Image (spheres, rainbow, N blue to C red):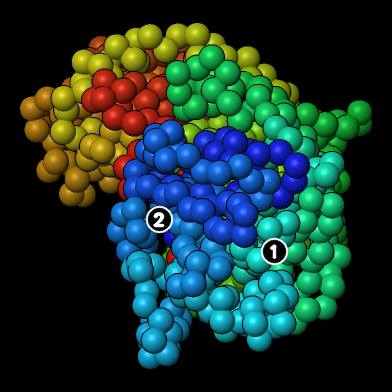
Amino acid sequence: MPMCGIVGYVGQKQALEIIVAGLRRLEYRGYDSAGVAVISEGELEVRKKAGKLANLESLLGTDPLPASTTGIGHTRWATHGGPTDSNAHPHLSEDRSVAVIHNGIIENFSELRDELTASGVLLASETDTEVVAHLLAQAIPVANGDLPEAMRRVCRRLEGAFTLVAIDRAQPDLVVAARRNSPLVVGVGQGENFLASDVAAFVDHTREALELGQDQVVAMTAHEILVTDFDGAPVEVKPFHVDWDASAAEKGGYELFMLKEIAEQPKAVADSLRGRMNKESRIQLDEMHMDEGLLRSINKVVVIACGTAANAGMVAKYAIEHWTRLPVEVELASEFRYRDPIVGPDSLVIAISQSGETMDTLMALRHAKAQGARTLAICNTVGSTIPRESDAVLYTYAGPEIAVASTKAFLTQIIAAYLVGLYLAQVRGTMFEDEIRAVFTELHGMPEKVDRVLDTTEPVRALARDLSAATSVLFLGRHVGYPVALEGALKLKELAYMHAEGFAAGELKHGPIALIEEGVPVIVVVPSPKGRAILHDKIVSNIQEVRARGAVVIAIAEEGDETIAKHADHVIRIPAVPTLMQPLVATVPLQVFACEMATARGLDVDQPRNLAKSVTVE
Ligand code: M6R
């Protein structure tokens, strides 16, 4: 499953309330079905339902669960088996002794299922998860009733990626979990403990957490947490403090998480810049822990990322190449390791990921490491896998991003990648100190500029409503405007379920211009006429080409660019900023446009169909 939500609780309180509240926080991770299991009077009680969490909540209203202080819960994004009641988690063993929830994919499940079927076990679902419940029930007596040991035995037989959490009706005060290539964090409370795929699930109760490593099993009671590897050897785990509180993961008066997250962008950008230039006006990324000698020795930068994060990487390419004169390649992580990429000890590979759990990016990162490359993660989620496995990490400080469509993560990824570029320029001496200071000062002014864009979104909203019946929208840009166009199109596709494509404006005449017909909206990110005038002139020509063929042109253009008005049907104004800063302001109206368009079409903005917040399978 690309990204299911998992919650486990053991303590003194009513488990069900805590679990359902946790699932509500995690629903963005998957929302095809949901379920819970608790132990009461020596029996496992399960309720599960296809559809959103609300369906499970209604079921719990009509068919309540008994009181219990131990339980597990799950919200699912279906892969093996459709989103039905029976495929929803938790899954029970045949004898109803064990309940299991799972995130990930068990690759050797058909082999294990055949083995179980041959031994007479009847499977009740089409999922890969259910095999684990049966295997666990068989392993418990072999392990003399020791649930953690049984879990280790089962895990040693599993291939693929998984977070598994299990409870056993015979051990009502114990929750056991295992992790391989899939997220799992432990929340450490007072007389209660939590397990979840994301700290958001328990941050109401505790902000103290433990990062689990790969191939580890955790056994948790209300007062004790024991972690071992898959062979049973105890391992030390790293504690961390969650530096945001529960309100950060709530809508806080906004109708949608996406609207809240769009509005949070000025703060997110400011937070991601804070403390990163010292009193001597030098870029200071001490927490990155990357040796300066090493940074001087690299001869290329490779960015690996997916979706929005890849678009942020493409923006950064223009800046990093300009500032450092190092070649920067940007590669979709899902393609990287399958094409024999040329990376080695002289390459700096930057993995950009909001969640830090995207499997395509993780696998690409591992491939880069195996080739000897130096690796740096730009990530928003402390304690996640990608930063853990990278040589160095630079965190973005966007705060939790809950809406599936990425917004504030994009802006802060650009900021972080720019900081890396400036730092490389500083270390390698490719920019003068005053030049670096000037860029940093520009960056520092961006929160206020983004704020101004946010204050003037009504025209773009009105346009989105007017165009909501369109069947296709094209986005054009040049230079850094090109990845912005890609990002605008991605937002519209995922939210409004509409054909939307971003193009380098100069490329249009090589084929895609055939898509233009009367009335097609074309959104053009117009470069600053003060940056490189030629880029502005060229895009004006590109606008004329599409307009001559009937397109309705919406220009995203800076204040003071008066020439554009006569070439466009609509002009959305953004503050005038230097060329490399423009993505930070030009993207915002495109986010608002997609959000409003989806709303006008009556769609679920925060949880678009077929998607999950991040994808933890390849
Ligand atoms: O968590 P990540 O940044 O690694 O996620 C990468 C993409 O899956 C993500 O950006 C996706 O494209 C967004 N839904 C786009 O809005």
Q: Regarding mark 1 in the picture, which secondary structure is present there?
A: loop
From the image, which quarter does the C terminus lie in?
bottom left
Can residue 257 be seen from the camera position used here?
A: yes
Residue in the image at 61% along x and 42% along y: 67
- Between 371 and 215, which is closer to the camera in this rendering? 215
Q: Position of residue 247 (x, y in %)?
A: 65, 24
Mark 2, mark 1: which one is toward the viewer?
A: 1
From the image, which quarter does the N terminus lie in?
bottom left
Residue in the image at 21% along x and 21% along y: 467
Q: Position of residue 476 (x, y in %)?
A: 32, 35
- Asked if the residue under mark 1 is in contact with the one under mark 2, i.e. CB atoms within 8 Å, the reply is no
Number of the label disc, if any, that sits on residue 171? 1
Number of the label disc, if any, that sits on residue 64? none
Residue at far right of view:
280
Amino acid type of the residue that numbered disc 2 sits on in the rendered structure: Ala
C-alpha gap between disc 2 and disc 1: 23 Å
Q: Find residue 234 and report its image quarter.
A: bottom right
Please give the residue where the numbered disc 2 appears in the rendered image: 88
